Amino acid sequence: GENVEQHPSTLSVQEGDSAVIKCTYSDSASNYFPWYKQELGKGPQLIIDIRSNVGEKKDQRIAVTLNKTAKHFSLHITETQPEDSAVYFCAATDPLGGGGGNKLTFGTGTQLKVEL
Amino acid sequence: DAGVIQSPRHEVTEMGQEVTLRCKPISGHDYLFWYRQTMMRGLELLIYFNNNVPIDDSGMPEDRFSAKMPNASFSTLKIQPSEPRDSAVYFCASRPSGGSYNEQFFGPGTRLTVL
């Protein structure tokens, strides 16, 4: 099955700096890679996703890059703000491995802290 | 829309007791997922339904766990008997059909503590 590794487990940045979180996956058939943000006491919320036919996707201060050859993808947050502080999870899914893309395999999460 | 609703938000019980977690998906969503989140194992998919039918329960840890979806607006996850190692946050999520990779909308979770 799919295995997703995520680094770093904790990340502390100064407000205004950039933050980068990296994930690797094992199943070359995976072709959908969402990123979720989880605030304290809440459920994860999708913030951006990317499909394997795209190398990069950007949404305001958030961007995701995908390298299918190396089987890794990254989340980039620019101009970080205190409200970006949360736990971020990457995930991957293989539509052929069962579930038509429903079976997300999550990384272990990154606790991001944006300091004033 | 109220989003995915889960109840209770917190549950404390003693080992051996039956625990029932409840979920109301977003209206119109055809898929419903149950996840478990722990520090050791992260976020794991337990089971998911499509149109009230269980599609994949390979993530259910053992026979003590069972899930049902009697109608499109309600699902339960039951643990009987509960054990301390079942302590975790359980999330329900739903998503609409009509595409291969639609966003899964998560509920606020139920924090279960088994003493």
Image (cartoon, coloured by chain):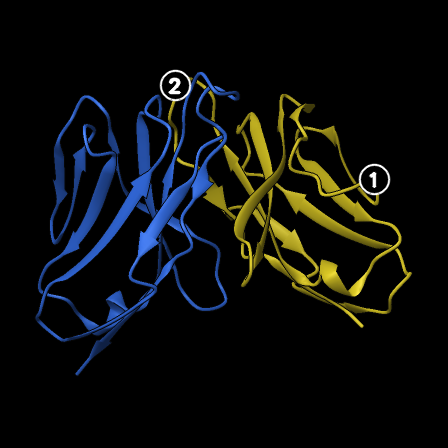
Chain colours: A blue, B yellow
Chain name for mark 2: B
Task: Assign a secondary structure to mark 2.
Answer: loop
Task: Assign a secondary structure to mark 1.
Answer: loop
Closer mark to the observer between disc 1 and disc 2: 1
The C terminus of chain A, quarter of image: bottom left
Residue B18's place in the image compared with A41, above or below, is above
Chain name for mark 1: B
- Within 10 Å of the Cα at label 1, are there few (<14), some (14-19), or many (20+) other Cα atoms? few
Instruction: Say whether mark 2 and mark 1 are on the same chain.
Output: yes
Residue A50 locus on image (x, y percent): 24, 33
Residue A112 locus on image (x, y percent): 29, 68
Q: Is A73 displayed left or right of B104 in the figure? A: left
| Measured Cα–Cα span from mark 1 to mark 2 | 32 Å
Give the residue at the far bottom of this rendering. Answer: A116
Residue B20 locus on image (x, y percent): 80, 51
Label for residue B99?
2
- Within 10 Å of the Cα at label 2, are there few (<14), some (14-19), or many (20+) other Cα atoms? few
Which residue appears at 39% of the width and 29% of the height? B102
Which residue appears at 64% of the width and 26% of the height? B56
State which tag comes first along the sequence, 1 or 2: 1
Q: Is A72 displayed left or right of B113 in the figure? A: left
Q: Which residue is mark 1?
A: B63
For the residue pair A27 and A47, the one nearer the viewer reads as A27
